Image: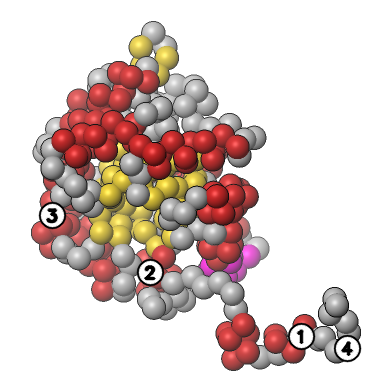
Amino acid sequence: MPPVFPTTRLRRTRQNQWIRRLVSETTLKVDDLIWPVFVVEGKGQCQPVPSMPGVYRWSIDTLVEQATKARDLGIPAIAIFPNIEEGKKTEKAQEATNPDNLVCRSIEKLKKNLPDLGVMTDVALDPYTPHGHDGILIDGHIDNDTTLSVLRAQALNQAKAGCDILGPSDMMDGRVGVIRDALEGKGFKNTLIMSYAAKYASGFYGPFRDAVGSKNQLAGDKKTYQQDPANTDEALREIQMDIQEGADMVMVKPGLPYLDVIHRASQTFNIPVFAYQVSGEYAMICAAADNGWINRDQVMLESLLSIKRAGGRGILTYDALNLAEKKLITAA
Ligand code: PBG
């Protein structure tokens, strides 16, 4: 029998906070979040990213201070993205495999000072190439298999520095398998891989490219390797392959415009599915709030909750520290 009024009054379970708390289906906790952070060379740096209010590029020393706050508030992990000096960007992305590069030094310092904070890194070449593409360009095309060998070396370089979670975000075919194989071969049995499995060629990455300094360099777009926003079956194939190749967790990116993909992925596979609330999603909320059009924190929480409701196990969000500091969410 379908529920009928007035026997059933759905407002009964909404009438005050205690009952709403009891019947709520989905929760967002600090435990669900990974905090992406930008790092630059230097000391004492706290450079605001204009297109992302509240987001800064930190030098390693200030990054450690911020990461300490995150750890103390219960945020399980941070994800590091480097802003590499122009002079270090090369066609072959050599800096990506330099054991003394900015990312490796950041990992080492973080793991030494905060061994119980998870550290994730990006495996992709875009911060290291002058053209801002995630792979190696040969005759105007991103060459998949040439890129794989550089990614393999980059991943090992980060694992050696102590990285806990490698995040291949490049969307080359076969990269997860190559990286997993390299890790096993070198004895890094416990290094986790969270693959950016379903990563779309999205307009929502604009502010990120500003933050890492690849915005003005990007030649063309990333449509030959990142996914077509029209497709979801293809996302499932990407995820399935990454699982077979050795991913421990998979990610859908961006988050809010792809809730259907998060939902399908989490229903289809029994592997933790994460989502990335990307820079453009974050920036839109901040920009509307700065105009007084929406309540920033309320919309941020609602947006993140929708990702959990869709089936996301956890979320990368630039707002992790803010939400935890304001006690808008807590650890379990
Ligand atoms: C590149 C990378 C990007 C992001 C994470 N890793 C940008 C891109 O693919 O161009 C985007 C994150 C964001 O927008 O917040 N490997």
Q: Earlier in the sequence, mark 2 or mark 1?
A: 1
Which is more foreground, mark 1 or mark 3?
1
The residue that mark 4 highlights is 6
The residue that mark 3 highlights is 109
The residue that mark 1 highlights is 11
Q: Left or right of 174: which side holds 273?
A: right
Q: What's the amino acid at mark 3?
A: Lys
At 24% across and 45% down in the image, what residue appears? 40
**How far from the left and from the top, in percent, is residue 65?**
21, 64
Question: Can residue 74 be seen in this snapshot?
Answer: yes
In the rendered structure, find residue 31 and report the number of the disc placed on it.
Answer: 2
Q: Which residues are magenta?
A: 294-302
Which is more foreground, mark 4 or mark 3?
4
At 55% across and 50% down in the image, what residue appears? 268
Task: Specify whether residue 169 is painted magenta.
Answer: no
Q: Are marks 2 and 1 in contact (CB under 8 Å)?
A: no
Which is more foreground, mark 2 or mark 3?
2
Q: CA distance from mark 2 to mark 3?
A: 23 Å
Which quadrant holds the N terminus? bottom right
Q: Is mark 4 within 8 Å of ligand 1?
A: no
Q: Are marks 2 and 3 in contact (CB under 8 Å)?
A: no
Q: CA distance from mark 1 to mark 4?
A: 11 Å
SS type, badge 4: loop
Q: CA distance from mark 1 to mark 3?
A: 53 Å
Q: Earlier in the sequence, mark 2 or mark 3?
A: 2
Q: Left or right of 113: which side holds 264?
A: right
SS type, badge 3: helix
Outermost residue, front side:
1
Q: What's the amino acid at mark 1?
A: Arg
